[in-house]
Amino acid sequence: GENVEQHPSTLSVQEGDSAVIKCTYSDSASNYFPWYKQELGKRPQLIIDIRSNVGEKKDQRIAVTLNKTAKHFSLHITETQPEDSAVYFCAASLSNAGNMLTFGGGTRLMVKP
Amino acid sequence: NAGVTQTPKFQVLKTGQSMTLQCAQDMNHEYMSWYRQDPGMGLRLIHYSVGAGITDQGEVPNGYNVSRSTTEDFPLRLLSAAPSQTSVYFCASIDRDDEQYFGPGTRLTVT
C-alpha cells in the first residue's frame, strides 16, 4: 500500500521567514496530494492541494510543488506569521481505495514573533 | 448546510464495552470515510464507503464495523473496546474533486 513520509517533524522559524515541509510517497498511481493545517483540538483543514498532472500550485503565501518522477512533494509558506503556527500534514491518495488518503506523520511549525 | 456532523464529541468507555460513533453529512456526497488520529500522529484510514450499501476496509479496520444504509449516514461501531482504541475519530465526506470534508471529531478514551 501507500506510504507517506514527512520531514521535518518540527520546524521553528522567525516571523517573516519561509518554511518548507517535504513529503515522499511510494505509490506511483497516487494522483491527489492535499496539505492540511491542524490546530490543537481541531479538525484538519485543507490549505492547498495538487494533482499529479500539475507540477506547481500557488495560493497567496502558500505553494506546493510535485515531482512525480522522484515521488515527492513539498509545501512552501512564505512570509510566515505567528498564526501559521500549527501542525501540518501532507497526504496522498490511495489508488486502490477510492482515492481515500494516507497521511504523513505531521510537522509542528512554530513561528516566533 | 451543517456539513459533516459527529456525535458524541467525547466518550469514555470501559474495556469490553461496545458503542457506535455517529456521522452524518448533508452534502449528498457518495464517498465517506472514517479515520483515527493518535496523539502526535497523522490520520489513519479505518473504513470507507463509495456509496450506500458499499463499504470497504482501510489501513486499520480491526475492531471496527461500519454500514452505509443511506447516503447521509455512516456510523462506526466499536465491537469490544480496548485501550488501544483510545484516539480521536474523524469522519469525512468526499466531493467529486476528492476534497475531504472532516467532521469535528469524537475524542474516545477507553479505560
Image (cartoon, rainbow, N blue to C red):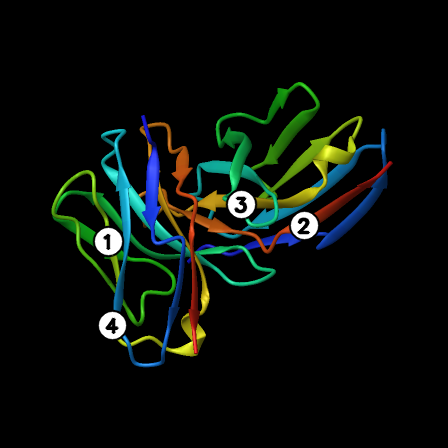
Pointer 4: residues within 10 angstroms few (<14), some, or many (20+)? some
Work out whether B6 lies above or below B87: above
Work out whether A4 lies above or below B28: below
Q: Secondary structure at mark 4?
A: loop
Which amino acid does the dot numbered 3 rest on?
Answer: Lys
Q: Position of residue B34 (x, y in %)?
A: 34, 52
CB-based contact (under 8 Å), mark 1 and mark 2? no
Question: Alpha-carbon distance for marks 3 and 4?
Answer: 26 Å
CB-based contact (under 8 Å), mark 4 and mark 2? no
List the residue tagged with mark 3.
A42
CB-based contact (under 8 Å), mark 3 and mark 1? no
Which amino acid does the dot numbered 4 rest on?
Answer: Leu
Q: Secondary structure at mark 2?
A: strand
Pointer 3: residues within 10 angstroms few (<14), some, or many (20+)? few
Residue lying at the far bottom of the rendered structure: B16
What is the number of the mark on residue B75? Answer: 1
Q: Nearer the viewer, residue B97 or B109?
A: B109
Quadrant housing residue A19: top right
* Mark closer to the observer (1, 2): 1
List the residue tagged with mark 4.
B79
